[in-house]
Image: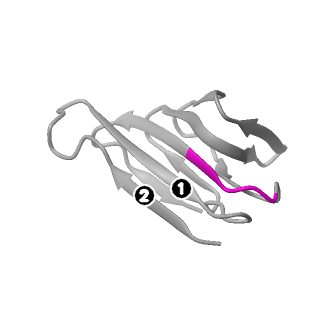
Amino acid sequence: GEVHGHALTGNESQHIGASLVHFSPGARTRMHRHTSEQFLFVVSGIGQVGDHDGASTISTGDAVVIPPDTDHWHGAGDTGSPMTHLTVMRTGSETTVL
């Protein structure tokens, strides 16, 4: 599936970066980790967030905090629904795709 992101903060913040990310049905990120916490807030739809131990379903209004250096993935997954989430992380956080 397709994934489209839109940066909300640009260069206007020295400390946080925020983006809206839309996942088409079935789309999700690859397993990855960040050097800072990641805050996800589901704006619309049904999605999933997972790690090596499994996945949890998330939907409109749900919030998830992913600790730094935690292997995870997120997206619409196999829910059959598109999903859009807000993601917020510390500026300068590095992402490693596994």
Asked if marks 1 and 2 touch (Cβ < 8 Å), the reply is yes
Q: Looking at the rendering, which quadrant does residue 97 occupy?
A: bottom right
Assess disc 1: are there few (<14), some (14-19) or many (≥20) residues with their C-alpha within 10 Å of its C-alpha: many
Which is nearer the N-term, disc 1 or disc 2?
2
Amino acid type at image mark 1 = His
In the image, is 53 to the left or to the right of 84? right
Residue 91 at x, y percent in the picture? 28, 38
The secondary element bearing badge 2 is classed as strand
Residue assigned mark 1:
22
Q: Residue at x 70, y 55 (%)?
A: 76
Report the residue that reaches farthest toward the bottom: 1
Q: Which quadrant holds the N terminus?
A: bottom right
Amino acid type at image mark 2 = Gly
In the image, is 75 to the left or to the right of 8? right
Residue 5: which numbered mark, if any?
2
Residue 38 at x, y percent in the picture? 50, 35
Q: Nearer the viewer, residue 13 or 80?
A: 80
Reply above or below: 52 against 57.
below
The secondary element bearing badge 1 is classed as strand
Q: CA distance from mark 1 to mark 2?
A: 6 Å
Residue 74: which numbered mark, if any?
none
In the image, is 35 to the left or to the right of 17? right
Q: Residue at x 48, y 39 (%)?
A: 86
Q: Which residues are magenta?
A: 80-84
Q: How is the image coloured?
A: one colour
Q: Main secondary structure of the magenta part?
A: loop
How many callouts does the rendering have? Answer: 2
